[in-house]
Image (spheres, coloured by chain):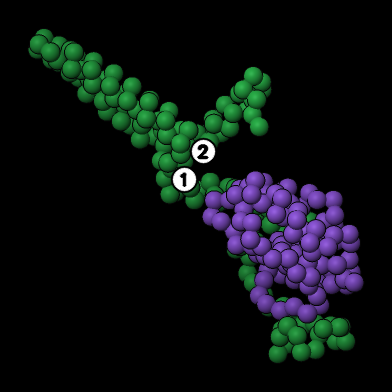
Amino acid sequence: MRFYILVFDRLPMSNVKAFHEAFVRHPGIRTWWHYVKSCYIIGTSTLSSRAISDHYHSIAPKYGMPTRHLVVKVDLKARSGWLPKEAWEWITKRAAEQL
Amino acid sequence: MTNPLNPLNWLRLAQDWFRKTERSSGFRPYLIFLLITAGVSFSLLSFFRDVPGVVSVALWLLATSAGGFIVLFAVKAFQEPEFCRSEVHVERMARLELEAMGSEDRILPAEIVEEAPAVEAPPEAPGLPGSAGEGGAAE
């Protein structure tokens, strides 16, 4: 499984709940991580960074989310920072599945 | 594109509008104002009904305040439905509308994620690709 990070600059009154539900519903998204408000880590076997970007770009305006965003492939094994314990547990677990 | 001939579209529009107005606290000052003017009007009608002109003034006050605000709110409801929301209300609704955070196997309310204590990244397993010279957790 490959992992991509999606980053955007969330607007204060975006309909984030509906956006989240629509975004993670994509069948190509096998696993997701969302412990930082304006950031997702996506685990996928079928989607490219372009496909994730297109998916985000197609639904973001409907929920008042910004169209500006960044999708980059990430290496979960090379990580650092300060986050809740559960966030690290997910990253550690998924790092083993990373291609 | 909304089809004006489809009654379901009108129903959906009405539902959306009511959903917005329910989220707004803008009707609160409207009701307070109406209560005040109604109180003044009924007081005038009760205590000064014999004074010439008072009845018509009281009725005019009641009618114009109610009618004026109905028109004002009708217009604002279409232009800017959230125009009179209080900051506390906005904050509360924004909190309610926070998305589920976490991950697919552990979905958590955003409030819990935000209040959870942060810990530093666990040490990387030795020998993993990318563990040397990257990240900085073990630095």
Dot 1: element: helix
Q: Which residue is mark 2?
A: B23
From this viewpoint, is residue B20 visible? yes
Report the side of B129 relative to B113 (left or right): right
Q: Residue furthest left?
A: B51
Residue A45: x and y, percent?
A: 89, 62
Q: Which residue is mark 1?
A: B89
Residue A65: x and y, percent?
A: 62, 53
What residue is at 85 percent from the left and 67 percent from the top? A2
Residue B7: x and y, percent?
A: 64, 19
Q: Tell me if label 2 and label 1 are in contact, CB under 8 Å.
A: yes
Q: What amino acid does circle 1 point to?
A: His
Q: Looking at the colours in the rendered structure, which chain would you say is drawn in purple?
A: A
Q: Looking at the colours in the rendered structure, which chain would you say is drawn in green?
A: B
Chain to which the residue tagged by mark 2 belongs: B
From this viewpoint, is residue B46 visible? no
CA separation, marks 2 and 1?
A: 8 Å
In the image, are marks 2 and 1 on the same chain?
A: yes
